[in-house]
Amino acid sequence: MESGLAAGGLAVSSESLKGDCRVSILPGDGIRVRSSVQAMYGDSIHELAAQSWESFGAPKIRIEIDDGGALPCVLRARIEAALAEHTRQNLPVLPLPCVCPQRDRRRRTRLYIPAHTPRLFLNASVSDADMVVFDLEDAVPSSQKAGARSLVRHVVPTIDWGKTEPAVRINSGIAGQADLAATCQSGVHLYLIPKVESAEDVARAADVLDQFESLALLMPLIESALGVENAFEIVRASPRIAAVSLGIEDLVLDLGAQRTASQVETAYARGRLVNAARAAGVQPLASVFPRFDNPEDVKAYAASARQMGYEGIGCIHPSQVRPAHQALAPSSDEVAWAKSVTARGQADEAASALKGAMVDVPVFRRALRILQEAGGQR
């Protein structure tokens, strides 16, 4: 190799490293690769490590890689994160991908995946969720957050997301600004900002995106009583805001309430959020549903959210996606009713009667929306 570092090592087999790798930086000189696919890709992994080593100034170190069949983008991310931590350098600048986020796209389901677990990434990309959220916040241990940032910035532009929107939930405060700075040039379409309580919280995130000339959108997560009271101010804080949601667990804690299946303890907050979102022209999205063992429970939760005016829910498992989409879609009876309404005339006509009910402009427009939703199902 041009780096002068020697390859070496035997195949490694470890279930804990499946689809991932472990990179160690030690005193000495050289690169050692042990991989479950050593015979086929050992030399390529060594070459990739040598390139990253050179990009950090070729420090005098020994790089040891234990690979469980990780994708090249995962390998590069892990190697760069280890080198950045050891040398105390910033991560290398990546070529800026061409990204055009869609503010008004459908977001029926957003699937959260811990950003430090590469073995889940490919499954998430084919889950049929409208949005995949790389979670850098609560799901990632403090010791692995830097590595998770590196994974996001390499994985997002590499995987073909199709119709799925790649998003990231950042940390709050200074750590969140670091998350944005490290990943906003990687092709992330939307950032979820946790624990938002004021317009200033949104402005700080928007300022970072402006600094890096990112077109990414924002989605505040309101998780406290103060945030609920400031909901309208928050959702109007930036033209980047495309959607908003509640963080129910933190909100219930802040309220001093008890979590119930009926959700009565958050009824006011959920209603206020929908109203604020609609008044500001952004999408209201319901909180995560914490159970995935019963599809009917998911359907019931999603249907209840739709009745309140929410356009989507959060998911913690791919198995929740299909039942959520089913519940959020107009029923056959709704579609039949909408067709009968729209067949009678235009929205600017005077009110009329249909099967004993009045049909006026708002009713006509609601029928049009139902047909639009039905026509857009995957």
Image: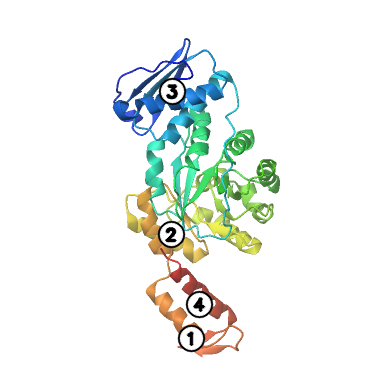
User: Badge 3: how crowded within 10 Å, few (<14), some, or many (20+)?
Assistant: many
Residue highlighted by disc 4: 367
For disc 2, the marked residue is: 302
The CA distance from mark 1 to mark 4 is 10 Å
Q: Position of residue 185 (x, y in %)?
A: 59, 41
Upstream in the sequence, badge 3 or badge 2?
3
From this view, report whether residue 373 is shown above or below residue 181: below
Q: What residue type is labelled 1?
A: Ala
Picture coordinates of residue 320, whole percent (x, y): 38, 53
**Furthest residue toward top:** 28
Give the mark toward the camera: 1 or 2: 1
Work out whether residue 106 can be spotted: yes
Q: What residue type is labelled 3?
A: Val
Few, some or many residues within 10 Å of mark 4 (<14, 14–19, 20+): many
Q: Which residue is drawn at 40% across and 22% down?
A: 65
Q: In which quarter of the image is the C terminus?
A: bottom left
Disc assigned to residue 23: 3
**The residue under label 4 is which amino acid type?**
Ala
Percent x, y of residue 271: 56, 60
Q: Quadrant of the N terminus?
A: top left
Residue bearing mark 1: 343
Q: What element carries label 1?
A: loop
